[in-house]
Structure formats: C-alpha cells, structure tokens
Amino acid sequence: MEHLSFVDLQASSGITDEAITQEFSIQPSFLDEIKRGEKEAPAHLINSLTILADFQPDKKCLDTGSQPTSDTQLDQKMSGQDFLHFLESFDRIGRKTEIFERNGLKYYVNDFWTARQRQSNRIHEISYRACFKAELPSFFIERLTDTGDSVFDPFMGRGTTLVQAAILNRRPVGNDINPLSKMLVEPRLDTPSFSKIIERLNALESDYTLSDEQTSNPDLLTFYHPETLDKIEYLRDYFIDRTATGLIDNVDSWIRMVCINRLTGHSSGFFSVYTLPPNQATSVKRQKKINEKRQQTPDSRDVFAIILKKTKSLLSAYDQNFHSSDYILSTGSANDLATLKDDSVDLIVTSPPFLDIVDYAQDNWLRSWFAGFDIGGVEIAIHKKVEDWVGFVRTCFVEFSRTVKTGGFVAFEVGEVRNKSVLLEECVAEAVQGLPFKLLGVMINDQKFSKTSNSWGVSNNSKGTNTNRIVLLERIDG
C-alpha cells in the first residue's frame, strides 16, 4: 500500500470525497490539491485510508451502510430495555461503552458508528447543510424496527433517514418546511431508470438553443459563464413550466434534483466558478471578492455532461430493490403533521434546527431561485433564545405523541452549541415533561476517544457541532 498514489489509495479504501471532508475535517479545496499532487496528505489521513484499504467488508454491510454486530441482526427488533443493554455491552472495536449521569440524564458514550467503517450507498450523496451520515439512522432502524415499519423524519432535509429506510426495506415517511427537501428526497425514492434519464437529457440538450436575449439575472454572471447561465435558465424555465402544467414526472424530478445539487461548488463538477461547498450558496457580493482574490472568471461548463456524470455516481451502487413506491412526503411545520394518521409511526430519527446555528435561507437562496420559489417566504424555525427553542420542540413532541405508536421510539439528534454553554439534550428533557415519552438516555457517538470525565464525551467547534448526541425516547401509554 505504501507505494500507491493518494488517488489509488483512496480508491482502494472505498472512501468518498464527502466522507474524507466530513470525517477528517479536510477542506474540499485542500483535498483537491492533495489529489493533484500539489499538497501532501496529513499522516493521520494516509494511515486511516491504508487501514481501510486492507479491510474488505462483506457486500451486505456495504449495501446497508451499517455493519451488524454480533449482538444484533438486521430485522431483529429490540425493546427499549434490550436496546439499553445492547449499548451497555457494545464493543465493536474493543472499546467499552462509557456510562455516566449528569443532571438526571444517563449518557452512553462509544464509537457506535463511523463513516470510516465503510462507504454508504452513493445514492445519499446530495449536499445539504447540517445533515447527518447514513450510519446514524441505520443504527436505529436496524435495531428498533422490523421490515415494513414506518420510519419518519419530521425535519428530513436531504432525506438521509428516508433513503436509508428505503434501503433497509422500511416505509419512508418525511416532512420538512423547506420545499427544497421534497425536491431532493422524492427522486431518490421514486427513482427512474438510468436509460430514461439519458433519454430525457438527450432530448433536453437537443431542444436547447443559445438565447439571443441577455439574461434577466446579471448578478448570477458572478457565478456562471454567460453560456452556462443560459443553459441553467433554460432548464429552470422547463422545470417551472412542467410543474405548473402538471406534466412533471419522476425523470424531470431526478434531473431537477441533480441540477439543484450542482449549481455551485468548488470543482469542475459543478456549474459555477470556484465558490463555497455545494451546501452553501454565498452572496453575490462575497463571490465577487472570492473571484478577485483567486483572480478567476467563470468559464463555460458542459451542464448536460455534469448532470450525467453526477447521475452515474448517484446510481453507481443503486439496487432496484431499494426503490420505494410506498412513502409519504409532506411540506410544512413539524408541529402540524396533518398528513399523518394517529399511531402510524414506529420510529422517528431526526435532527431539528439547532437554535440559530445555520441560516438555511441564506444557504439556499440560489437553489430556491432555480426551483422557482422565494426561500424568504418560508418560515424556517430559527430560535435565538433557548426558551423559544424548548417551546418549539415541545409543540413538535405533542404532535409526535399523536403519530408515534405506543412502544415506538424517537431518536432526536442534537448538538452542543454556543461553545458548549448549552446542552440541547437537557432542553429536550425539559420540553417532553408531562408528555407520554420515557427518556431512555443520551447517546454520544464519540469517534475521537476523548475522556468523558473532562468534557462529557465531546470536543466540538465553538460555533457548531461535530459529534452526534442523540436523545432516545420511547412512546409510552398516556
């Protein structure tokens, strides 16, 4: 392995660019320089990839995106008490679970899952801010549900929970107040065949002619070459017209999803000039500064070829058995789930907005423009005051108490915020008081092997969160 180039070593390890940037805190631009041989890869990254290259997991584990341990098997549903015993005895990599109590909450700390175990199915690789990896929902879905059970995410974002539920033959149920979410999720549940996507792309490209008129969005030339922007506007008009006339189908929806995901980014695989990562759209003013600093101007991009390349990547590990025709998606607030029946959900795996950590409107202004709606008119929950966040979470759990079956579970992923001055798991405990939920404990997925006695199992960035903290609750009679 020591004689392999970095590119070959990465290929042998089976780890994607997305996993490297997220798991090893490597900036995408730095990773690109490493792959071009312009910069040297950090020793810890080389060591980890070497280990992974030597380790060949079986195909079943690759397909599910989460490795069953000797303590559990897929489709073997656990009770709440059995699950806690499982956490206590968890020992996947020779590390015993650390257990402690703080302010009345019981904590379970271990390296329960990690993207370094293996590569998740590439169908997940759609960028979105503040999304978790597929290993997280898979851990709970495999152990707390049976085949055919309903798995719900009321803040579905890019749809990791739903897509993983479909992969594991559960019924995906999702909701988000941002209309973009449904556009990003549904095409990966109701997925068209590759041949139909190719046929539609060829037709769209054949019908396209360069417009003689100047763009009505000149500010966007900060991001795009004029010819590239003309193609983007052509596709945007096409999708908006197909939606308005009711003609949009799953093939159109797939291509629109890929377009939304490729609008801006940091490599030639995106429509734009070099900019922020694809899950964040910077402002026109800031992009002008980026262009000046890098002395760059947008070059022409082959939009249709980029769409095709990303489609091939997303579907490279796709199995038609993952296709789900039985799903429920809605757009609205998580505390008003009118589309869901009482006692219809077996498991919730979700992550709510963390106070005011992420500005979803700013991040998605360009995506919402392409999709044809004003993100400024979407009432995305952003709470500056902790007490307001607690109140919002409580209204959500009131609705969860209606929709989750007795004996069902909620895995509520939260994080430390504001330089660890706020522990949101304690806020959740406050929010659910008096509601028919039993708080089983707080799981901390600690991949850095830090001592919990000093830091409660977390070593985070001051402005956000980089570990998983999950409040686990069971729906009880009441």
Image (cartoon, grey):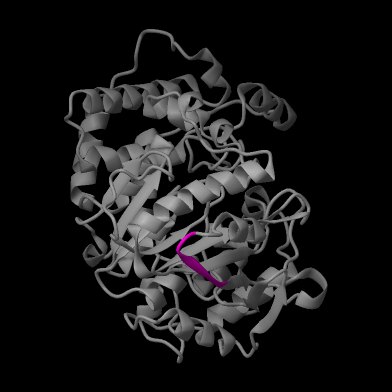
Q: Looking at the picture, tell me which residue is in the foreground, 236 or 34.
A: 236
Q: Is residue 289 left or right of residue 280?
A: right
Name above or below for residue 181 compared with residue 436: above
- The reply to whether the magenta stretch includes residue 169 is no
Image quadrant containing the C terminus: bottom left
Q: Looking at the picture, tell me which residue is in the foreground, 103 or 453.
A: 103
Name above or below for residue 138 compared with residue 252: below
Image quadrant containing the N terminus: bottom right
Total marks placed: 0
Q: Residue furthest top?
A: 213
The location of residue 455, given as percent across then percent down, is: 79, 69
- Residue at the (46%, 29%) spot, across then down: 378
Q: Is residue 326 left or right of residue 28?
A: left
Q: Is residue 154 left or right of residue 472?
A: left
Would residue 317 be seen by someone viewing this image from the given angle? no
Q: Is residue 259 left or right of residue 443?
A: left
Would residue 441 be seen by someone viewing this image from the given angle? yes
- The reply to whether the magenta stretch includes residue 437 is yes
Q: Which residues are magenta?
A: 435-440
- Residue at the (67%, 38%) spot, across then down: 384
Residue 424: image quadrant is bottom right
Q: Residue furthest right?
A: 454
The location of residue 225, given as percent across then percent down, is: 50, 23
- Residue at the (65%, 29%) spot, across then down: 296
- Residue at the (69%, 30%) spot, across then down: 290
Name above or below for residue 26 compared with residue 96: above
Name above or below for residue 306 compared with residue 31: above
The location of residue 270, given as percent across then percent down, is: 48, 39
Dominant secondary structure, magenta: strand
